[in-house]
């Protein structure tokens, strides 16, 4: 757990409450800066883990969890502020639970379902959209466009995961 990549992941987890405190305190610019740092740390820890052979079981578990909690924390803040409809969070959560369930079934079959490009694009679009909403909190068009991009990329990537891996269910008991 003492790898550089894992330390960066832990720092991202620590930044989540810092982001929320700043966002709820009305410190929009500071919250945006912390959120951007947290998002960039996701790219950094992934690069370091792969490039310097620092891939660990802790990192495999904590990195995607930190990403999801960071994104969901921001989305919940926007729902509470009326910038995003609550059903958006339900769609994102449903996709995450469904893909996690698919991966669990695949593991029972000694299969690993790797992250697809559509999932990476979904994550990037979501993080960028949420940054835009933080940067322009009073522009309803930014919130609307960001929300729809998040929903569409989430649905597309979720459907793609299930379509590409549909044979997992043929072998499931």
Image: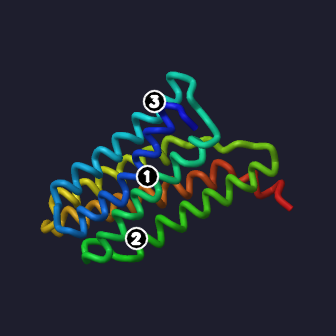
Q: Secondary structure at mark 1?
A: helix
Q: How many marks?
A: 3
**46 sits to left or right of 162:** left
Q: Residue at x 36, y 70 (%)?
A: 76
- Label 2 or label 1, whichever comes before in sequence order: 1
Residue under the point 41% across and 45% down? 11
Q: How many residues crowd mark 2 within 10 Å: few (<14), some (14–19), many (20+)?
A: some
Q: Earlier in the sequence, mark 3 or mark 1?
A: 1
**What residue is drawn where x is 68% and y is 57%?**
102
Quadrant showing the C terminus: bottom right
Residue in front for this viewpoint, 119 or 31: 31
**Circle 3: is it few (<14), some (14-19), or many (20+) Cα within 10 Å?**
some
Q: Which residue is mark 2?
A: 88
User: Circle 3 is placed at which residue position?
Assistant: 47
- Distance from Cα at disc 3 to Cα at disc 1: 18 Å
The residue that label 1 is drawn on is 13
Q: Could you say whether the residue bearing mark 3 is in a helix, strand or loop?
A: helix
């Amino acid at each position: 757990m003492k790898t550089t990549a894992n330390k960066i992941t832990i720092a991202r987890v620590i930044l989540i409450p810092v982001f929320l405190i700043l966002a709820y305190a009305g410190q929009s610019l500071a919250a945006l800066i912390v959120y951007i740092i947290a998002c960039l740390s996701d790219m950094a820890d992934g690069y370091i883990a792969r490039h310097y052979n620092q891939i660990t079981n802790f990192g495999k578990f904590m990195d995607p969890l930190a990403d999801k909690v960071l994104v969901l924390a921001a989305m919940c803040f926007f729902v509470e502020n009326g910038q995003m409809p609550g059903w958006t969070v339900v769609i994102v959560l449903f996709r995450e639970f469904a893909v996690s369930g698919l991966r669990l079934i695949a593991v029972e079959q000694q299969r690993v379902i790797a992250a697809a490009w559509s999932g990476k694009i979904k994550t990037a679009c979501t993080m960028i959209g949420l940054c835009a909403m933080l940067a322009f909190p009073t522009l309803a068009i930014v919130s609307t466009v960001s929300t729809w991009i998040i929903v569409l990329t989430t649905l597309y990537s979720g459907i793609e995961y299930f379509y590409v891996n549909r044979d997992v269910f043929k072998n499931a008991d």
